[in-house]
């Protein structure tokens, strides 16, 4: 009888251990994020047209600014997107958009975790970057286009094992870049916490502007354990190696054309030419070509168009900022600057906290 009681206790202990082991993976898969589905409520981040869920902060870059359209937080908008194919799950997704400009943005959230634990972050994302179809005269002939890779748009997810809130920190462990054009795709990464707090980042950026320039984020996750595809947690004390920086924008090759009989320089636009490429070919600046050809306020050129090229233009001058504003991003100040060369069209103000379709501003 005593032997039977001992065996019963032993089997009972094994059952308890087995149950504990069985619960561990489920516990590890518990989502530690607040509002992972971006359902809201949404709040304004210093501006009525820059809205994120209360649990998610936003960061916007304002440099580098080699072109007037590059890294323009003042032309970047964020709203909840209701339903449709642009929502991966639930009722809303987070939309960030900036038509006719580029933006570099990061959503982030700090989370408490067991000290020195392995964690995995993931998020679903969808891109829409394309130029609307136009006729030979530059007039729109359609209001839809398929998302294209030419803009150089990409998304990635990262973990700061130290719990910092700077998305440019070298301590962040980043996933590989994904380019989910017109489809949903998941980015994931694993890392090892260096304390009791980690920060998850969802990053998006582009190389070139386009008429439609949208990203949607949805169904984020932060769990304990190593769960990223091929993910390997960083060793304690090791320095995380960030991804190489995105290659700077490049100008398509443009062949320099001979001068006119009177000595003036004219470039006849060929298929594939860009203002940046033309400026590079003749050793002048885009702004000088714009000024000489009355192209202020537009970036469109047409095949066969004759562009006057400055023949004795001085080197491009750096225009100092004329104004600086502060946007509050969940308590973190983000500086934005505007320069005297900015000639983008004025856009109408958006209602505060409104749930509206995420359609970029119309062409000027």
Image (tube, rainbow, N blue to C red):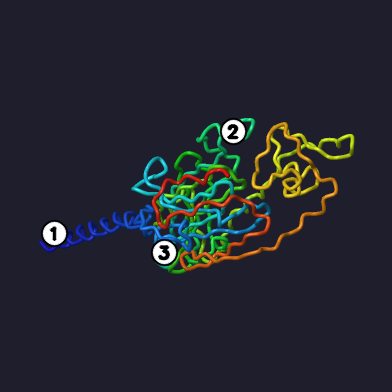
Tell me the distance, in whole angstroms, between the alpha carbons under discs 3 and 1: 49 Å
> Is 364 left, or right, of 123 in this rendering?
right
Residue 327's x, y, as percent?
A: 52, 64
Residue 111 — which label?
3
Position of the N terminus by quadrant: bottom left
Q: Earlier in the sequence, mark 3 or mark 1?
A: 1
Circles 3 and 1 in contact, beta carbons < 8 Å: no
Which residue is more in the foreground, 230 or 249?
A: 249
- The residue at 40%/66% (across/down) is 112
SS class of the residue under badge 2?
loop
Q: Total marks drawn?
A: 3
Residue 228 — which label?
none
Residue 225's x, y, as percent?
A: 41, 57
Circles 2 and 1 in contact, beta carbons < 8 Å: no
> Is 299 left, or right, of 146 in this rendering?
right
Q: Earlier in the sequence, mark 2 or mark 1?
A: 1
Name the mark nearer the viewer: 3 or 1: 3
Q: Which residue is mark 1?
A: 4
Residue 203's x, y, as percent?
A: 52, 54
Mark 3: give few (<14), some (14-19) or many (20+) Cα within 10 Å: some
Mark 1: give few (<14), some (14-19) or many (20+) Cα within 10 Å: few
SS class of the residue under badge 1?
helix
Circles 3 and 2 in contact, beta carbons < 8 Å: no
- The residue at 61%/30% (across/down) is 135
Which residue is more in the foreground, 311 or 172?
A: 311
Which residue is more in the foreground, 54 or 112?
A: 54
- The residue at 61%/51% (across/down) is 344
- The residue at 59%/43% (across/down) is 151
Tell me the distance, in whole angstroms, between the alpha carbons under discs 2 and 1: 86 Å
Tell me the distance, in whole angstroms, between the alpha carbons under discs 3 and 2: 47 Å
Q: Which residue is mark 2?
A: 134
Residue 124's x, y, as percent?
A: 44, 47
């Amino acid at each position: 009888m005593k032997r039977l009681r001992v065996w019963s206790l032993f089997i009972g202990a094994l059952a308890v251990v087995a149950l504990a082991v069985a619960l561990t993976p489920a516990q590890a898969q518990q989502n530690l994020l607040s509002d992972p589905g971006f359902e809201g409520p949404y709040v304004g981040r210093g501006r009525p047209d820059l809205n994120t869920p209360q649990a998610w902060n936003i960061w916007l870059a304002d440099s580098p600014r080699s072109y007037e359209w590059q890294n323009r937080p003042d032309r970047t908008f964020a709203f909840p997107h209701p339903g449709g194919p642009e929502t991966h799950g639930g009722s809303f997704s987070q939309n960030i958009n900036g038509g006719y400009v580029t933006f570099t943005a990061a959503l982030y959230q700090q989370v408490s975790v067991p000290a020195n634990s392995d964690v995995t972050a993931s998020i679903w994302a969808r891109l829409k970057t394309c130029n609307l179809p136009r006729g030979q005269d530059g007039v729109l002939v359609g209001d839809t286009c398929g998302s294209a890779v030419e803009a150089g748009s990409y998304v990635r997810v990262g973990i700061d094992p130290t719990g910092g809130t700077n998305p440019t920190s070298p301590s962040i462990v980043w996933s590989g870049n994904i380019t989910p054009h017109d489809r949903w795709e998941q980015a994931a990464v694993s890392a090892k916490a260096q304390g009791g707090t980690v920060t998850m980042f969802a990053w998006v950026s582009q190389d070139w502007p386009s008429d439609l320039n949208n990203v949607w984020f949805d169904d984020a996750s932060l769990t304990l354990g190593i769960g990223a595809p091929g993910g390997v947690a960083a060793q304690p004390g090791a320095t995380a190696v960030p991804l190489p920086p995105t290659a700077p924008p490049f100008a398509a090759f443009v062949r320099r054309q001979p001068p006119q009989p009177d000595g003036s320089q004219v470039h006849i636009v060929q298929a594939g030419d860009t203002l940046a490429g033309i400026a590079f070919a003749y050793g002048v600046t885009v702004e000088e070509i714009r000024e000489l050809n009355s192209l202020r306020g537009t970036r469109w050129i047409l095949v066969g168009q004759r562009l006057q090229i400055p023949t004795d233009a001085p080197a491009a001058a750096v225009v100092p900022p004329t104004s600086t504003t502060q946007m509050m991003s969940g308590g973190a100040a983000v500086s934005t600057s505007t320069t005297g060369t900015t000639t983008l069209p004025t856009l109408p103000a958006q209602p505060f906290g409104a749930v509206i379709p995420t359609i970029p501003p119309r062409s000027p």
